[in-house]
Image: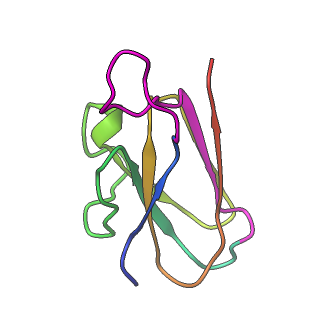
Amino acid sequence: ISKPRRLRLSYTKDGGDADRWKPWDYIEVDNRDSVAAIVYWATNGVTASSSLASGVTSVEPSGTLFRLYKNSIDRVFTRCTSISALASSATTIFVTVGRY
């Protein structure tokens, strides 16, 4: 397992606060092209980790670590500005975000 990678999802500042990024309301992580890799992921500054990802590890969605098995998709309604991802082997994932 390599180091987790972080991707900023928002490039627009929130209207009232110059230090806050405008969050997305929905995130989808797609691992359907993988036949072997497990993807561990987290949002909003939480670093992805394979040792703590056991489904839900926090009551707050912004601090939750997720484990995504091969050939599956996670869809989460949460306000997010970044994603941290870590894979058990080489793979490509697709991330979709949306606002409502």
Judge whether residue 31 is colored magenta. yes
Judge whether residue 27 is colored magenta. yes
Image point 26% across, 69% down: which residue?
51
- Which of the two residues, 14 or 27, is positioned nearer the viewer here? 14
- Which of the two residues, 23 or 3, is positioned nearer the viewer here? 23
Q: Is residue 9 left or right of residue 84?
A: right
Q: Is residue 69 above or below residue 62?
A: below
Q: Which residues are magenta?
A: 11-33
Q: Quadrant of residue 36?
A: bottom right
Q: How many labels sit on residues?
A: 0
Q: How is the image coloured?
A: rainbow
Q: Residue furthest front?
A: 18
- Which of the two residues, 58 or 2, is positioned nearer the viewer here? 2
- Image location of residue 62, percent across then percent down: 33, 36
Q: Is residue 60 left or right of residue 24?
A: left
Q: Is residue 100 above or below residue 80?
A: above
Image point 30% across, 49% down: which residue?
45
Q: Is residue 18 above or below residue 70?
A: above
Q: Quadrant of residue 59?
A: top left
- Which of the two residues, 65 or 26, is positioned nearer the viewer here? 26
- Image location of residue 93, percent across then percent down: 64, 64
Main SS category, magenta section: loop
Q: Quadrant of residue 18?
A: top left
Image point 45% across, 30% down: which residue?
13
Q: Quadrant of the N terminus?
A: bottom left
- Image location of residue 72, percent across then percent down: 66, 56
- Image location of residue 33, percent across then percent down: 75, 69
Q: Is residue 10 left or right of residue 52?
A: right
Q: Quadrant of the C terminus?
A: top right
Image point 25% across, 61% down: which residue?
52
